[in-house]
Amino acid sequence: MTLLSDRRSWIGFGGAGLLLALYPPLIGRIGGDFWITLAFQIFLWVTLAVSWNFFSGYSGYASFGHGAFFGVGMYATAALLVRTNLPFLATLPLAGLAAAALAWLVGMVVFRLPQFRDELFSLLTLAMTFIVATIVNNVDWLDGGGGVFLRQAEGIGGWGDNNVALYYLSLVIALSCVYLAYAIYHSRWGQALFAIRDDEDVADGLGVPTIRYKVGTFALSAFFAGVIGAPQALFLGYLETATVFAVTTPLLALMMAILGGASVWYGPIIGAVIITLLRQLLTAGETAVLNQMAIGMVFILSILFIPQGIGGIIQERRRRG
Amino acid sequence: MSPDQIIFFQSALNGILVGSLLGIVAMGLSLTWGLLKIANFAHLSFALLAAYMAYSLMVDLALNPVLALLLILPVMFVLGVAVQWLFLRFQVTTFTSLLLTFGLFIVLENLITFIWTADTITTRSALPDFLRKAIRFPPPLERFFVLPPDLLAFLVAVLLAGGIHWLLHRTAWGRAVRAMAEDPVMAQAYGVHYRREALLLSGLVSATAGVAGLLIAIKMPLFPSLALAWLGVIVAAVILGGLGNPIGALVATSLLLLVQNVWSVRFQPSWAPLFAFSLFILYLVLQPDQLWRQWWRQRELRRRLQAPSPSSER
């Protein structure tokens, strides 16, 4: 099936895009800024979870590096805005490329070595996150330990404090990310990744260029995490390494993908919406701690009782008729 | 000795001592990972939870540390058995256990925040005097000192590592557990009761987190994200020390913290984590232990081929 000529998928994605484009003038006008930021958060996490999934979920290489890629994107945008005169939109692709370059470098080494499968790959990407955080924390051009304020940067232009603009930007990024995940899922590329997940040695033996697929998809997945880092940097306005590179970020992306169903392209969207809503709607005052605990419990229970995720269940139902 | 040298050696010593405290935690992670194929990252949270329990027992109930430990150990043992029961019940793989225990990690961090609040707390006021006064070395080295909690942690760590090593290598139970780790099916065929030994081992390992917790409560101020702060060093040390090897885990943690401390004397402290993690990645990439094993095997082979066979010699 060639996707570009598939009318149904175009109607689906176009329709979803159009509906979501109408959201700010309708809901935002009535409900206020809270609903705009909530939607922004959802797009952000959808992008992170879906981009995590089209590499890690499809190929079975669970990465904890997504926090590093997301953070590299944020810091690339922040540094470029503060240190240079580049306009915000120009930093967007650069943020993505910086993250992709990091993933490509790591992938070129790691995917050639047979020892990095399963949990050792995860731990390696975790160690990579710590290393990146240490470097950012020590290089003055990026951070240097004091954090970065970027509200005053010249290049921001009309983007500062403009949540509706950030809404549309993150909508475009999230939609392209989801479309890519959908396209990969239905193509030879996706088949190759699934083959790697099911049995890499067999896939290799049958002539699947596994290293090329792994490195390429890993870099692309990092690219999206980096790009979505750009609007997040603007939204936060202040970055510090301890929060930007927190271990909870990759963990949340992973949780969303698994809860939603890592083997289906739309699974992580479901997970991202559920967990972001849980986090945003209930995070108020006293309940914040209990809420975090609930998220952890949901994650544990979903791994134990529905390891295939919500998306996996939906798919089974549909298959049965 | 110049003041610079004194600072250098003192910080190296402190690194080894603090490293041995974290080494007790690393040992536990290494044991379940190597022997039961369970990467239980919540083991770090267990140690922190035990530390908070020790705080409550010592400060709020004014119990002495030994009594506190006696109350904590059974609780931790049951916790360890319960977690392993869950893993066995759902037949989780190593990778799934890693995900699950990260979830548990989050739950426990927030549970601790919920019960004890996010404020930093310390048991200092409840400690007996002899635990608070620094001990100076005898004359030629009188300018060096150790803190009693550090020394205690070091001794306990060495005893535990040695004791566990002895248990694993010199007793029938240890042989059974190691056989089980090597090949569960074969071990069961030879009469090893997998389920029972796995539950027992997990309980005992979790009890060592109780010991570590008490020492941590005596040694340092507590806050809920402390376990997260240890994560990097401990995971690196567990891998570097060899999975399932308590002495290796202890030595690796001590060495990592020694190098980090010494590094911080000479260079910017904020660069220190880079060293541990780069070493960790380099080790995983190069796998020196595999190279060494290969080289050793080839040497043995060559020697056997060259030398006349042992039977003809005699």
Image (cartoon, coloured by chain):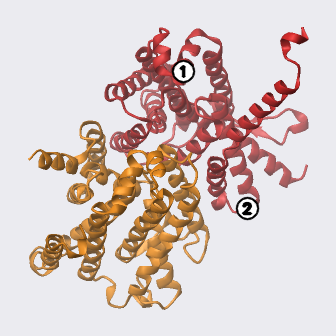
Chain colours: A orange, B red
Name which residue lies at 80% across and 50% down.
B8
Residue B130 locus on image (x, y percent): 66, 29
To which quarter of the image does residue A307 belong?
A: top left
Amino acid type shown at disc 1: Val
**Residue that carries the numbered disc 2 in the rendered image:** B267
Q: Mark 1 — on which chain does it sit?
A: B
The chain carrying label 2 is B
Give the image location of residue B68, x and y in percent. Answer: 48, 23
Residue A202 percent across, percent down from the top left: 45, 46
**Residue drawn at the location 69% of the way across and 63% of the way down:** B268
Label 2 neighbour load within 10 Å: few <14, some 14-19, many 20+: few
Counting other residues with Cα less than 10 Å from the Cα at mark 1, is it few (<14), some (14-19), or many (20 or more)? few
For residue B149, which quarter of the picture? top right
Three-letter code for the amino acid on which mark 2 is drawn: Phe
Q: Is residue B201 left or right of residue A189?
A: right
User: Is A273 positioned to the left or the right of B222 in the image?
Assistant: left
Residue B294 found in image quarter: top right
Q: Nearer the viewer, residue A199 or A317?
A: A199
Which residue in the protein does label 1 denote? B66
Query: Residue A52: percent from the left, percent from the top?
Result: 37, 59
Residue drawn at the location 48% of the way across and 70% of the way down: A99
Q: Secondary structure at mark 2?
A: loop
- In front: label 1 or label 2: 2
For residue A245, say whether it is visible: no
